[in-house]
Image (cartoon, rainbow, N blue to C red):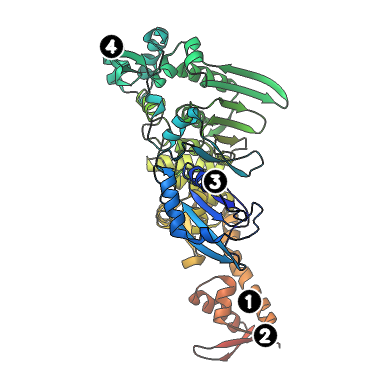
Amino acid sequence: MRLIPTKETINTEFKSDKKGLPDAALTDAVVAMANSDGGCIYLGVEDDGTITGVKKEHQDKDGVCALIANKTVPSIAVRAELLEDNGKIVLKIEVPKSRAIVSSSEGKILKRRLKADGMPEAKPLYPYEIQSRLSELKLLDFSAQPLEGSSLDDLDPIEQHHLRDIIRQNSGGDKSLLELSDTELNQALHLITDNNGKMVPTVSGMLILGRPDRIEKFMPTAKTAFQVLQGTEVRINEISSKPLLKQFDEIESFFKAWNPEQEIQEGLFRIPVPEFSPRAFREAVVNAFSHRDYTQMGLTRILIDDEGLSVSNPGGFVEGVNFKNLISSEPNGRNPNLSDILKRIGLAERTGRGIDRIYEGSIIYGRQWPDYSESTASSVKVFIPRSAPDLRFAKMIREEQEKRKNPFSIYALMILSIIRTEKRASLNRFENEIGLSQSRAKSAIEMMVESGLVEGHGSGKTRFYTLSRRVYRETNEEAKYVRLTDIDNVRWPELIVKFAKSRNGIINKSDVMELLKINAGQAYSEIKKLVKDGTLIQVNKGKYAKYRLNEN
């Protein structure tokens, strides 16, 4: 069996040693890997994956480790081992992700990245990218840095009043800030800071209070686009470098005009059901503003088209976060100072869990979940698809939350949504879809069972969950519940008989357990039913009991 990967990835690199790889080339490969996410370098493998082996001088793994430590700044401690594959010796070098920016002893700073064709390469880490890398490593908050060359005259007094209005109007705003003078307020929010004895705007200060022309000069990366497409026709295409609070107000106005509602009747009341949840939209835009990489050129882009709503921003997910663990990961921000400001003035979730609101906005109406899968290493994109609401499910959620006098957790909502879509789901399904550990997933689902919304069927690894009979009854769909939960009772005997025929008419309890993925007690019960109705005949008793088909 081959021990070495067959192709290169962002975390796997092949290096040929047929002509003797120079020390500098090996060091550069290690530096690039350390300045990215770490990974493995296989010395003695060609770019196409062909194993050609390493020369004798590179079979001294301790010597290679010492060479790399001496040729990197700060020193990188790698782990090396020799592998034999298809009669060839290969040196595997495991490179850890560095918590600082690493260079070669000659001063070269490299980073590993993907080319347009999806293949990896080592490229220089340019000076303008260093601040972004330090932010990723949580060694620098770019949004809190003083903006060199700017002055307090670059801030707009109108936006200062606007800031106070935002704090006053939002229920989550820190009202104690309103008691401060403008200078004290700006210092408390770190919108301005002392720079060599002179008060100047921070990056956050320019983004929130700056005059548009000064933002254009000092923060040319801070552009936002709101676009609406109908088919191939462009209905709106607004691109601006206005301060964030003004941009946010304008974006919300555009959004309202392009977010139609339908109404559902509930007793004497009509409840509006929007195409896209305004609360989810708000959080998606705030997240894009607060987590984007302001050292990169590009747009924070909001797009509404025939397929749905997209919000994207330059800068990939921060370290430790990806689109699969978004819900379960701890809140992390690329721009802690800017994020804190948006929380304190009431625009963002104080808990840092705005992602929960984005998912909740779709789930509570029984719609498809938001999709982050189009995010890349250099950008984050959330897509909220257009889909018809499940009004019965939405009504059930609303009524249950009113009974509980407490909203469901995002985990509970996701569990209910999965079961609604798939009708029946296992614990493993919840783990994989939500990104929870097994213990947390089990705790969350069992709480739903106790509440009477969900029922568990079976035991052990075969246990699955459905919406409860009560839920189906209240939505006038009890027939679906009966079909869903009783289908096994109809199919299992048929499957047992079919399997016995394939085994020359003989079957035992272990065969039934393996066939139906059920426990010993359930298997014995199913066999006894077939014995009782004469389908099976017991051949012998005890631990090794077998049963044969009755051919009469």
Which badge, 3 or 4, is on the more N-terminal residue? 3
Which badge, 2 or 3, is on the more N-terminal residue? 3
Q: Which mark is residue 25?
A: 3
Disc 2 designates what residue? Answer: 505
**Count of marks, rendered view:** 4
**Dots 2 and 1: beta carbons under 8 Å?**
no
Mark 4 → mark 1, Cα distance in angstroms: 80 Å
Disc 1 designates what residue? Answer: 496
| Residue kind at label 4, given as amino acid type | Ser
Mark 2 → mark 1, Cα distance in angstroms: 10 Å
Mark 2 → mark 3, Cα distance in angstroms: 67 Å
| Residue kind at label 2, given as amino acid type | Gly
Which badge, 4 or 2, is on the more N-terminal residue? 4
Which badge, 2 or 1, is on the more N-terminal residue? 1
| Residue kind at label 1, given as amino acid type | Ile
* Front in this rendered view, residue 54 or 41: 54
Q: Position of residue 130 (x, y in %)?
A: 46, 31
Near mark 4 (Cα within 10 A), the count class, few <14, some 14-19 or many ≥20, is few
Mark 1 → mark 3, Cα distance in angstroms: 63 Å
Disc 4 designates what residue? Answer: 181
